[in-house]
Amino acid sequence: MSEPVKSQTIRVVVNGREYTRTVEARTLLVRFIREELNLTGTHFGCDTGHCGSCTVIVNGRLIKSCMMLAIQADGMSIETVEGLANPDGSLSPIQDAFSAHHALQCGFCTPGMMLATKYLLEHNPHPTEEEIRRGIKGNLCRCTGYVNIVKAIQSLANNEEVTL
Amino acid sequence: MSGTTVTTQQTARTQWSGQSIPRKEDERLVKGQGRFADDIRRHNEAYVYLLRSPYGHARIRRVDVRAAQEAPGVIMTLTGDEVREIQKPFMEIAPPPGGYIEDYCLAVDKVRFMGEPVVAILAETAEQARDAADLVDIEYEPLDAVVTGEDALKDTAPLLHGKVGSNVVWHGLYDWGSVEEAKRQADKIVKIDRLHFHRFTSTPIECNAAVVEYYPGSGEYTFWCNNTMPQFAAMFMGPALGIPTDRLHFVTQDIGGSFGNKITTYVYLTICAILAKKSGRPVHWTEYRTDHILGGSHGNERTFLDIEVPVLNDGTILGLSARAIDDCGAYPRYEPLGSVIWSQVVPGVYRFRNVRIDYTQVVTNKCPVGPNRGYSRLQHMWMLERVIDIVAHELNLDPVEIRKKNYIKPDEMPYETPNGCVYDSGDYPRCLDMALKLINYDYWRQRQAEVRGTGKLIGIGIGSTLDSGTNNFGQARIINPELPFSGNGEVANVKLDLYGEVVVTIGTTPQGQGHETTAAQVVSDILGVSPDRVRVLIGHDNARNVYTGFSGTYASQFAVTGLGAVQGAAQKLKREIQQLAAGMMGSDPEEIELVDGTARVVGRPDTAIPFIGLANVVFANNATMPEGLDVSLNCTYTYRPPFKVPDVERKFGNLTLTYATQIHACVVEVDEATGETKILDYAAVDDSGRLIHPQIVEGQVHGAAGLGIGAALYETLEYDAEGQMLTPNFYAYKAVTALDVPMIKTAAIESPSPFSPNGAKGMGEGGGAPLHAICSALQDVMRQTSRAIVHDSFNPSERVYRLLRQQPSARRGVEVISNRS
Amino acid sequence: MLLPELEYVRPSSVTEAVGLLNSLPDAGLLAGGQSLINVLKMRIGGYRTLIDISGLAELAVIDHAQGHLRIGAGVTYDQLIHSAAVSLYRPILSEVAARIADQQVRNRGTIGGNCCYNDPTCHFPPILSAVGASFEILGTEGRRTVSADEFFVSYYQTALNPGEMLVAIEVPEARPRSGDAFVPLSVGGTDVLNVVTGAASVLLAEDGSIRDARIVVSGVAERPLRIAAVEQALLGTRGDGDALDAAFRLWDGNQLTPPDDVHASGEYRLAMAPVFARRAVEEALVKARRDFDE
């Protein structure tokens, strides 16, 4: 039978780069990403899983990294905001659309919001306005009233040329 | 005033200002490279955890931190008893007796609100600090709590601050014109018993955070933080810590929203400062959402009692009298400034000239308030809009017509209000017409009749508001004549650097308003370079940037004060460049133009000297400087609005420089069986004077509308009778999601301000118009059913359900008295 | 955000998970974690040792056999939404799952976790009661199956005994001429917090009259409440306005003491219970009648 552990060495691939670290069982994935890997583009804005600032993609699934333990991510592949830009550093279409449509003001919710957008469009390339709003419901923004975020996503949804 | 234009026809007055250029801030933010306060790391930093009061009001009998001190990783603890020896109580803005309140960074002897910090623990890791908190043993003696403004004034109310002798922070009578005379002239007097503006807050998604380091060599503290009004913080912290305020070095970079909520964090920064000095370690404090809602900064809650409105039969409102009780929570902090700030908009957008408000601010066992988007004006303007709708409702007048009848007319601009404020420009009727057109008003009036009896009810509402920007801080003297403040101002520095780079610093602390972008636009137009070539340094840093006592980002003023300063500094630099280039070319400074990053004789590209060449002469090659020139290429300018000190006795004077207009209109659908309210359409028309960056302005309009919609229907901060906070996290504080903010329709007109240096008006806060518009729409629903009065600014389904079922025999809280019957 | 010290173990089978649950002190199961981890953050409860069952493939399976869907307790909301079998045999479960929280939560939260948490605002307890689900429980003594009416005991309490775990939920496939509906009263915005939920499942006879009805409300009592009197009164009727009026006159909330909290008063919940129950019946009837139109 398996034995409980207080800490464990885990291996994760984040934005294509492999990391091996020892983590306490109690460490949340968001704290691991920020404190251990120093990838501070992943934020947190609440302590109940509501705000979505800590959103990342783990093994292809959009999740909130404040409701997953780092130890659970052992062997998994993680994508954070730092992995969004094109390899040459230029902005990806989502990043570009958010900027062009003024879909960010303070920029704090933006990393999570863009990852939610990416997941939405990968699973539903032509969402309706209602589907867009449902797709980002788990990401709170206090600056924009969501108006320009929805517009930015609509611009991507209606664009056949876009490769996310 | 003339000069109103529709922005869609905007003329290209300048190359960069007025254009929605890509924001300079965006690239780092969309790449996750923004640097927010909690992202800062200092070598060898230690972590703070704050143990907070579980009680709303209790005496602290005993605090035992021994076990916590022995816990793994714990470096030290700090208690209120220790703080009392180290810290002087923070300055109070109120005069005595309200000024006798003693406010420390940790609770001393008593706790006065749930969430008040009681013990600070510093440990090697954040987890260790948190774990040790479970080992602290505190004995409390619970005390009766007071949780409403009205109860706080009762003789039997528990006292929060014994030295004050009551729970009153400040009281003042505001009386302009003659309400008594207006009542004599009126056909009717509409009396409203009570209106209540609820407590909510903007909850920026980034909570507070700080890394604080003490350097014994100079006695300087450095605060990497997200405070949005650092010199206000310094004014409280310097005396409290017994050090010159210039030893307090604030650095802000990206800030994840504030909406005013991050102005009063000096209390927490003081805890960190004490720990940093005592421990000799950089200390890192992270506030989580529950901490933030319990102990951050709430919006002011205000109750209006005994409202009397003299009116003529045609709906002309002659004046208004009321009592206002403002609940500022357990400690005033920024308050009682809100007790005067509302008077920037005494009549709102209306013409009546007789106003008497008996205003009292009290403490209660709730979280202290702080400025919150629309600060103190939105409560008052909400009351005014309720009054307009209730008068229309009771006298059976059309809500649109009564507004138009009472609006200040465009040809009356600039308009002096009864208390001496000068509304600079605007066209309220036109904005209203545009808003009604956007929601297709006639269609919905027809639909409203059609859906009656189907179980659905439609209501149409209007919110007419002003966003008063650029405070005259002299109004603080109306609160406390001893305060040495007046006017306002911001400062900027624009320079050419060693290699000809254009570098700008400002005193502000932007949180999404795009200051780097708009400052660059202004500089670009003056210096003839593209905004890409203008580097605006990120954030506030009082060891690097220039600043004034007013520096920061609050109170809708950057477009006027910040850009006014940038404009002045850039113009100074332009003159220096012209002098230098003219000297180098042997021509006249007036003949030099700046084009594409060069200085040249007008129309002669062959004479162009690039900025690097000019910088080289001044900074690295100065033996070649033309004779007799005194240029530094490093220019600072302080913009000061033309203010006078208000007349404290009469409470009279110009309290703000600009008045942006926001007129909102909305359509709601109410489910008669359940009270559920859905927004069917929403429009916001704004007049923010001359626009520097239309897209940013529109974004602010959207954001203010979103927060207002949330506050009107979903968001409330509630306490029970013992002062237990019932909504301490996002489970219970239901911050509005993307599903519940509709596509806000917007339109704008531009009435340039004659008073600001660029014709712009401050506009970021908005006037809380969604609260007014949604209440107005619900009143329109009640008009068709129970004739209940919408008496609260917060209307969740349950409240709407109850209003719909209010019996005709029930006391409605409103009465119309005929004067000449 | 700072959890208490924890121990963590990841069993490789359901049997091993049950073994660990029975051998470790103060141990609990970590499924999707979308509630449990928040409880741990607040340090108001939870366990010292977490047994992580989120990776157990055998819990994440949806089968269809012999007129029943068998849904593993570890099936996520997102899996339910995209399951062809669920969409075909009991589509209401997909529809309900789609209204839970948000995409992120739906990618991790599980139907089993939702049922075992059994908060009065949870989505699945009322709808599973309405569709007559049964719950497969594994303990050291073996397997047992209980009905929804038995499973949901009281606030945050289920029929699970210490050392037992929920392994699967069985839902009968929808029959011809039947319809299911889920109509919540959400406070705080659209699909934010369901303070009262009406759920219904109706089956029509060939003549269009109501042959069977299961009507449930949650949010007014310690467990999802079947409204037997209303169900009985509707049998044999055509479920038209008059029949519903007559049936719902039998609704009696006098014995109930609904929660009275910052989200909604008990009085309001009580008033809303028959409204949402009735709306659920109406919606279920509309769906059931579609089979006649086809």
Image (cartoon, coloured by chain):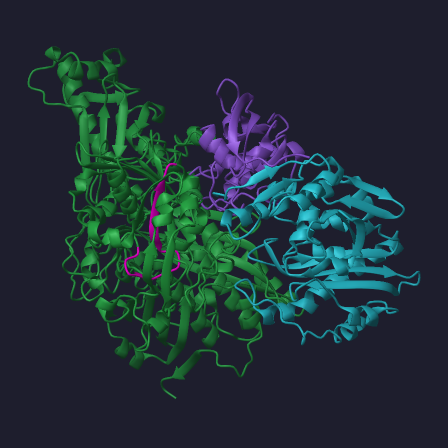
Residue B85 image point, x, y percent: 20, 52
Asked if residue B577 is positioned above or below residue B45 in the image, the reply reads above
User: Is residue B528 on the magenta stretch?
Assistant: no
Drawing shade for chain A? purple
**Depth order, front residue of B108/A140:** B108
**Depth order, front residue of B554/B702:** B554
Asked if residue B614 is positioned above or below residue B716 in the image, the reply reads above
Drawing shade for chain B? green
| Left-right relation of C186 to C140 | left
| Left-right relation of B622 to B92 | left
Residue B44 quadrant: top left
* Residue found farthest to the bottom: B821
The residue positioned 52% from the left and 51% from the top of the image is: B736
Does any portion of residue B307 appear in the rendered image? yes
* Residue found farthest to the left: B628
Does any portion of residue A132 appear in the rendered image? no
Residue B475 image point, x, y percent: 21, 57
Span of residues in magenta: B107-124
Asked if residue C198 is positioned above or below residue C64 in the image, the reply reads below
**Chain identity for the colour cyan used in the image:** C
Which image quadrant: the C terminus of chain A?
top right
